[in-house]
């Protein structure tokens, strides 16, 4: 891990400051994170709408449940860009084995229901701990930022829901023959479920880059505090400055005169 290549300032932060930094990071890499999310999410959407026809609510539930999977390529991408590793969109997809398999069963089962999963997702993906090690690691990392991580999930979920409703209304404006706007749209959810699911999926993809980046910054900020990354970087800078300072002093003193 090359701490000297971090694109963020390594200092102690509060949980809300870390989330604010995550929003800024999500804005910076939004387009690529958005595209990486849809690369996985759209095929799942198509499969659920094609093969799950018995129940109108089940396709949406499957999409919602698979959100941790959709977020993985974005998290992998951000974890490399944070250290100035030029990963890029296509390189991330080519490395799909690195981000799709670690802890896949866990994130789609018991860890899916964690309210603070945005902060804990990097543990599973980047550290690949055993079940016992994960519990200890999550306890240590979450001892300070658990509340902020939970509120991050709650607030962005509601924001996502509001945007989804707005998206359905927008779809009605562009496709008035297929969708009739009004309370009947939501009352007759079964007949309009495909449009509602599509609008919801797009809004998930819009919000996901900010959620992933904010949770990742909570994780990174906690590691900076626990592992003293800021102290290590300061020490490295100090050590690198010593030879230069010594050389400058020797040049200022002039050549050494030998007896």
Image (cartoon, rainbow, N blue to C red):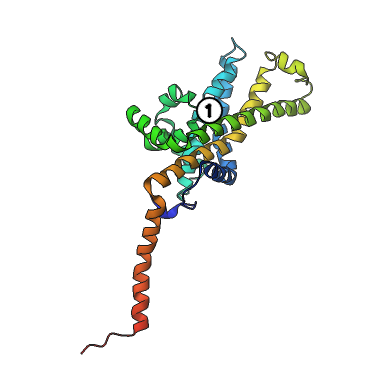
Residue 187's spot in the image, x, y percent? 72, 14
Which type of secondary structure does the marked residue at label 1 adopt? helix
Residue 92 in view: no
Q: Is residue 207 above or below residue 226?
A: above
Which quarter shows the C terminus? bottom left
Q: Is residue 243 above or below residue 117?
A: below
Residue at 62 percent across and 13 percent down: it is 56
Residue 71's spot in the image, x, y percent? 51, 33
Relative placement, left or right, of 60 versus 118 is right
Residue toward you, 158 or 75: 158
Residue 14's spot in the image, x, y percent? 51, 44
Q: Quadrant of residue 206?
A: top right
Relative placement, left or right, of 246 versus 155 is left
Residue at 74 percent across and 18 percent down: it is 185
| The furthest residue to the left | 259
Residue 110 in view: yes
The residue that label 1 is drawn on is 67
Residue toward you, 216 or 103: 216
Residue 173's spot in the image, x, y percent? 78, 28
Q: Quadrant of residue 203?
A: top right
| The furthest residue to the bottom | 259
Q: Residues within 10 Å of mark 1 (few under 14, many from 20)?
A: many
Q: Is residue 27 above or below residue 57?
A: below
Give the tally of numbered discs.
1
């Amino acid at each position: 891990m090359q701490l000297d290549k971090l694109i963020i300032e390594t200092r102690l932060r509060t949980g809300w400051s870390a989330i604010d930094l995550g929003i800024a990071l999500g804005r910076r890499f939004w387009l690529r994170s958005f595209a990486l999310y849809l690369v996985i999410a759209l095929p799942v959407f198509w499969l659920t709408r094609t093969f799950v026809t018995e129940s109108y609510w089940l396709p949406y539930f499957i999409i919602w449940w698979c959100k941790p999977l959709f977020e993985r390529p974005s998290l992998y991408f951000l974890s490399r860009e944070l250290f100035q590793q030029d990963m890029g969109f296509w390189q991330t997809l080519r490395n799909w084995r690195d981000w799709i398999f670690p802890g896949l069963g866990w994130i789609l089962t018991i860890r899916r229901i964690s309210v603070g999963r945005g902060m804990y997702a990097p543990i599973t993906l980047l550290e690949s701990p055993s079940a016992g090690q994960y519990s200890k690691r999550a306890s240590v990392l979450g001892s300070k930022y658990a509340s902020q991580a939970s509120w991050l999930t709650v607030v962005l979920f509601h924001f996502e829901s509001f945007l989804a409703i707005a998206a359905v209304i927008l779809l009605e404006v562009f496709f008035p023959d297929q969708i009739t706007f009004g309370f009947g749209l939501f009352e007759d959810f079964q007949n309009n479920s495909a449009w509602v699911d599509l609008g919801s999926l797009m809004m998930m993809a819009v919000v996901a880059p900010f959620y992933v980046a904010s949770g990742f910054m909570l994780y990174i900020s906690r590691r900076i505090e626990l592992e003293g990354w800021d102290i290590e970087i300061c020490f490295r800078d100090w050590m690198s400055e010593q030879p230069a300072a010594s050389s400058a002093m020797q040049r200022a003193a002039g050549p050494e005169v030998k007896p």
